[in-house]
Each structure stands twice: as C-alpha cells, then as structure tokens.
Image (cartoon, rainbow, N blue to C red):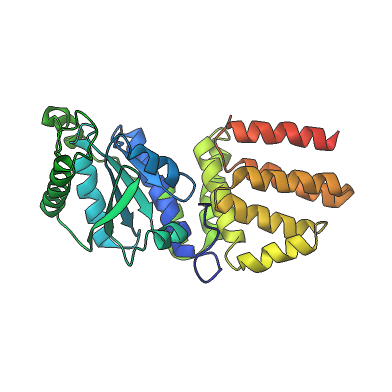
Amino acid sequence: MQPSDFSPNSAVDLGARKAALEREAKQRAEESAGRTNPYAVNVDEANFQQVLERSLSAPVVLAVLAGWSEQSKQVETALDKLSKGSGGNWLLGKIDSEASPQLVQALRVQGAPTIIIAIQGQVMPLMQGPATEEQLREGLTQVFGALAQQGMLPPGHPGTVDGDPSATPEEESAPEAEADPVDAEAQAALERGDFEAAAAVFEKALAADSKNAEAKIKLAQIRLIGRLQDVDGPAARQVASDRPDDVDAQITVADIDMYGGKFEEAFDRLIATVKRTSEEERDKAREHLLALFDLLPPGDPRVNAARRKLTSALF
C-alpha cells in the first residue's frame, strides 16, 4: 500500500490534517514527559506491512480511531493502559481513520473506533464502537485464550492480556504534562481555520529562539496544510504530468507527496524540476525544496541525500 494523498472527495481534509497535528503534538508531549507507551505504534499505509509482519511474533491489536471522536479517545486511553501493562505480550497499532482513509477502506472498517486483531499476518475484527477498559480486557482475553488453544500464539506467549503489573505503577502515577502555551495558541487558531494566525505563533517562537527545531517543523507543517486546502489531488497530478516545466504544478504535487509521507518522491520531483528549468523558475523550485526540508527533523538522512542531489543538479 502507498500513503493516501487525500480524503475521498479528493480535496485535502482540514479535519484530517488538524487531527494529525494533534496526534503528533500529543505524542511529543508524552515523549517529553516520559509517558510514551513503549508497546504502541502509529500505523498508516506506509508502515502497515511492517506492522503486519510483527504479528508473526506477537499479536497486534489495531485500533482504528478518529481524532474528533470522544469514544475513540476513551478507547485509545484504555488500550494504552492495557498495552503498558502487557509487558510486551502484544503490540498496539493506532490507525488515524482521517489521515489514512485508504487503509481504513482496505481493512473494511465501517466506523471508528474499531478494534482488529492481527496474528500470523492475518487480520480479524474484534469489536466496533465504544468500549470500556473492562470490556476491552474481556474481549482481548477471550481472543488471546482462543488463539492459545489453536496454537497460533508464538512459543512462550502466556495467552493473557496482562503482563507483570509491577512495571506500571510509576507510569500511572506520573503527572500530566502541562499543555505548551505556544501549541495551545496555534491549535486554537487552527480550530478557527486561521492558518495565518497559527503560522504567526510559531514565527514568533522562532524569532525568540531561532534554534527551536520543533517550532520550525510545526511552522512548515501549517504552511503546507494551508497551501493544500483547495487542491484537487488527481487534477493537480494530471497538470504536473502534462506540463513538466510548469514549476508551480510541480511544486503543488511535491506538497501533496510531502503531505502523504512520500518525502523522497517530493524531493526528487523538485530536483528534477531544478535540472529542467533556469533562472527565476529554477530558483523558485530550489527555494521551495529547501522549505520542504524544514518538514523533517534536522539531520534526517532523506534530507541529507536530497541536499547532495540538489548540489549535483545545481553544479
């Protein structure tokens, strides 16, 4: 599977983009507070096959969630708690239904939240709709017990949901991380649909600290989302295909690819555009490529490789 470019209506979905930003912000906050679930992974079209392969060695509980759904948030919280207490008996895979609609469709999911079990490379539905922690524990216990009886669990797997409970009290008692006021202000602007105001928040943060890598990435994300709000994906790709020397068309598709997680494809497209064009058009493609580099962390190997290719293209 390849990463999805757009929501089903072929236009960039503000809700999906906002949900993705919220999930990333939440994950960063948990990482900084030392509360990250070591047995959970975010799943999309790009890494789904790798996660499925992990089900050969341990069960994977796939949770299809929606950022706007309170029921999804409750289910996610309960699964995180159960997963942390599992001691690694099983992996929790979180699928953002808004950000990965093609994956959701491939899994034949009708709504969020939905729980799916992956084992030995195969997937099977468990439950759909709201569920309490106890309901989830009961459902997973029944499934793991049945899998153990059928000999489908790896050798040494206890066939239970819980692991060593002594490993979790410290995590459960950890204080909640305070919301970053910069993130909160930007999020409020995004909820109003005001991308300029959200961008201004991070521009101000960078003016105060030019080495703030996180603010730089978030500013680049917001600018990318803003540029794609009214874009028709298939139409944009067709224009870029028909007009290879149209820098604006190539830039738009590069933005689409960045949004879809196809970073190398986006970089290669603009590097090829740099090679084909000259003077102002060439500078325009080059400058946009440099701006796209800001979407990835400093030192990212994909950016380093693209910088080398760009240098070769320029000289």
Q: Could you tell me residue 311's position as x and y percent?
A: 78, 33
Give the residue at the far bottom of this rendering.
Answer: 9
The vertical placement of 188 against 53, above or below, is below
Q: Could you tell me residue 240's position as x and y percent?
A: 74, 61
> Horizontally, is 136 left or right of 92 in the view?
left
> Horizontally, is 276 left or right of 193 in the view?
right
- The residue lying toward the viewer, choosing from 131 and 104, is 104
Residue 177 placement: quadrant: top left
Give the residue at x 44% y 51%: 21
Give the residue at x 68% y 44%: 267
> Horizontally, is 168 left or right of 50 in the view?
left
> Horizontally, is 97 left or right of 273 in the view?
left
Can the viewer see residue 286?
no
Give the residue at x 39% y 39%: 53
> Image quadrant for the C terminus?
top right
Give the residue at the far front of this rendering.
Answer: 150
Q: Could you tell me residue 200's position as x and y percent?
A: 55, 52
Can the viewer see residue 141?
yes
Give the residue at x 44% y 53%: 20
Q: Could you tell me residue 83's position as x and y percent?
A: 22, 40
- The residue lying toward the viewer, choosing from 76 and 56, is 56
The vertical placement of 214 against 117, above or below, is above
- The residue lying toward the viewer, choosing from 210 and 80, is 80
